[in-house]
């Protein structure tokens, strides 16, 4: 099956710094989503981005489907950005189920 | 719409007991998914429904697990004879399928199960 790898596994930043999280996947996908998991465990949707570039405030994401990777950019980080960020992909003819990476745990220090 | 709703939020049970979780998806969504997440890992797919039909079950879903979506709306996930290894967060998600197009999936708050 498809493999999803996220890097780095952990990241510590000072408030105000910028960061880039990466997601590599091993096969063609027809769905890619980025999530932020809050301290209570809920997955918060950040981007639905099977291809192209999107921006939402301080966050933006780019997926280059032909090269099988996606990037999540966080600018001017805040302590509330702390948590685990997951990339998840869906493949053709598999009913829309998502395959998750292992996540990047981000800690933003004041 | 209030989004995907799961209950209970937390469940502590003794080993060997049966437990049942409920998921109410976003009302117009025809696909419903169950995932399991253990500490330090990403969520893993368990099963999914399109309307009331259960179309795929992961090998992670042992015969002690059963899921239903009787009228194509809410779903239940039952675990019989719970084991300590069943302790995890159980997440439900829903999406709207349009032919082969996978649309954005939305997740509920999860049910955290602890088996003691």
Image (cartoon, grey):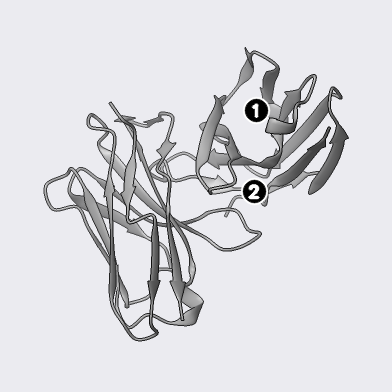
Q: Report how far apart the C-alphas of labels 1 and 2 lie in the structure.
A: 16 Å
Report crowding for label 2: few under 14, some 14 to 19, many 20 or more residues within 10 A (C-alpha).
many
Task: Give the secondary structure at mark 1.
Answer: helix
> Where does label 1 land, which residue?
A65
* Residue A69 shown left or right of residue B4 in the figure: right
Residue B44: percent from the left, percent from the top? 51, 57
- The correct choice, above or below, for A110 with respect to B67 in the image is above
Q: Using the image, determine if residue B92 lies above or below residue B40.
A: above
Residue at image position (28%, 26%) is B1
Residue under pointer 2:
A101
Residue drawn 66% across the image and 59% down it: B40
Q: Chain of mark 1?
A: A
Q: Nearer the viewer, mark 1 or mark 2?
A: 2
Q: Which mark is residue B18?
A: none
Compare residues A96 and B86 and report the one nearer the observer.
Answer: B86
Helix, strand or loop under label 2:
loop
Point out the residue furthest to the left here: B71
Figure check: A53 above or below A5: above
Image quadrant in which you'd find residue B73: top left
């Amino acid at each position: 099956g498809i493999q999803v790898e996220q890097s780095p596994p952990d990241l510590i930043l000072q408030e105000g710094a910028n960061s880039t999280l990466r997601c590599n996947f091993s096969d063609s996908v027809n769905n890619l989503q980025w999530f932020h998991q809050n301290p209570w465990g809920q997955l918060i949707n950040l981007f639905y981005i099977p291809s192209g570039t999107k921006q939402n405030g301080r966050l933006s994401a780019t997926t280059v489907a032909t090269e099988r990777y996606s990037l999540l950019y966080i600018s001017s980080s805040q302590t509330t950005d702390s948590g685990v960020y997951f990339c998840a992909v869906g493949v053709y003819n598999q009913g829309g189920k998502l395959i998750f990476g292992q996540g990047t745990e981000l800690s933003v220090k004041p | 719409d209030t989004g995907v709703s799961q209950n209970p939020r937390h469940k502590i049970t003794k080993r060997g007991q049966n437990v049942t979780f409920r998921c109410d998806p976003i009302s117009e969504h025809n696909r419903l998914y169950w995932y399991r997440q253990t500490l330090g890992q990403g969520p893993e797919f368990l099963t999914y429904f399109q309307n009331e039909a259960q179309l795929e079950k992961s090998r992670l879903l042992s015969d002690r697990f059963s899921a239903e979506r009787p009228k194509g709306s809410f779903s239940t996930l039952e675990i019989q004879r719970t084991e300590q290894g069943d302790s995890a967060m159980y997440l439900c998600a829903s999406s709207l399928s349009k032919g082969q197009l996978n649309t954005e999936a939305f997740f509920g708050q999860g049910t955290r199960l602890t088996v003691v």
